[in-house]
Image: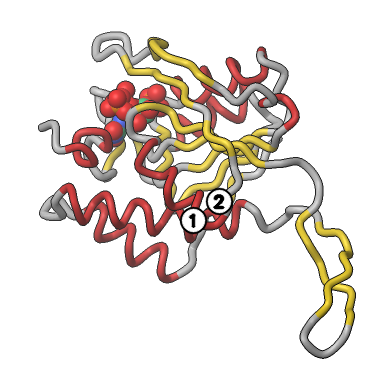
Amino acid sequence: MSTVHVITHPLVQHKLTMIRDKDTGPKDFRDLVEEVSALMAYEVTRDMPLEEVEVETPICKMTGQAIAGKKVGVVPILRAGLGMVNGVLRLIPTAKVGHIGLYRDPETLLPVEYYCKLPVDVEERQIIVLDPMLATGGSAAAAITYLKKRGVNSIKLMCLLAAPEGIELVQREHPDVDIFTAAIDEKLNSHGYIIPGLGDAGDRLFGTK
Ligand code: PRP
Ligand code: URA
């Protein structure tokens, strides 16, 4: 079974509370989502392997450490995952970015795919899937299934809020994928919205409602 990592750092929790606030407008919402994503990326990358490298300081030569292993790819689930991309790229500027477009059918709550563009060498990369909301888990599970079909075998899922229902689905369908979230909320309402949640992440990011 995969591990669920809840990022309890005070800065993350403080900013998450501001994100949840219904009076936070799109500009602040976007800035805060980006900031929290950067802080979370720090934890998501904690287990990256290191290798020894020679470096010459102004004083002498020494052996330092540099990141080794797989290159990173970030894959936001459109639309709302886009809000997390720049935060992660601040810490990993060389990461390639793929996009998977999915929306939830409002009646069935099932994900409908409408776009996909991934880096050509996606299967060689450590992929971090980005989506602020893990609600029923259908969108994240479908995106991960798609990535696995493309040959990716190293995937982490990073979200801001997770519902227990979404965690259960992703863990059941993808027991190899660790989940990183800033909070696990109580439940879903009858429309599949996370309670207490933060509302509709895509609409709040892009001001579409
Ligand atoms: C939201 C959110 C997730 C999905 C989560 O996207 O960004 O992708 O819902 O729900 P699930 O876990 O039940 O699948 P939405 O479908 O509203 O599309 P949008 O990002 O374009 O607004
Ligand atoms: N998508 C959102 O944007 N918010 C929710 O609470 C659930 C799904």
Query: Residue 93 has which mark?
Result: 2
**Who is closer to the viewer here, 7 or 56?**
56
Residue 207 spot, x, y in % from top left? 14, 38
Mark 2: which secondary structure?
Answer: loop
Residue 104 spot, x, y in % from top left? 33, 17
The quadrant of the picture occupied by the N terminus is: top right
Q: Do the residues labelled 1 and 2 touch (CB within 8 Å)?
A: yes
Residue 88 vs 14, above or below: the answer is above
- Ligand 2 is in which quadrant of the figure? top left
Question: Is any part of residue 192 visible from this angle?
Answer: no
Q: Cβ(mark 1) to ligand 1 < 8 Å? A: no
Instruction: Give the quadrant of residue 121.
Output: top right
Looking at the rendered structure, the kind of residue marked 1 is Arg
Q: Name the residue under label 1.
A: 90
Looking at the rendered structure, the kind of residue marked 2 is Pro
Instruction: Give the quadrant of residue 109.
Output: top left
**Who is closer to the viewer here, 108 or 123?**
123
**Residue at 52% across, 34% down:** 97
**Residue at 47% across, 25% down:** 99
- What is the crowding at mark 1: few (fewer than 14 residues within 10 Å), some, or many (at least 20)? some
- Please say which color scheme the image uses: secondary structure
Q: In the displayed structure, does residue 176 sit left or right of residue 169?
A: right
The quadrant of the picture occupied by the C terminus is: top left
Residue 150 spot, x, y in % from top left? 66, 15
**Residue at 54% across, 54% down:** 41
- What is the crowding at mark 2: few (fewer than 14 residues within 10 Å), some, or many (at least 20)? few
**Residue at 11% across, 54% down:** 23
Question: Is any part of residue 84 visible from this angle?
Answer: yes
Using the numbered discs, state the Cα–Cα distance from disc 1 to disc 2 in whole angstroms: 6 Å
Q: In the displayed structure, does residue 71 sit left or right of residue 19?
A: right
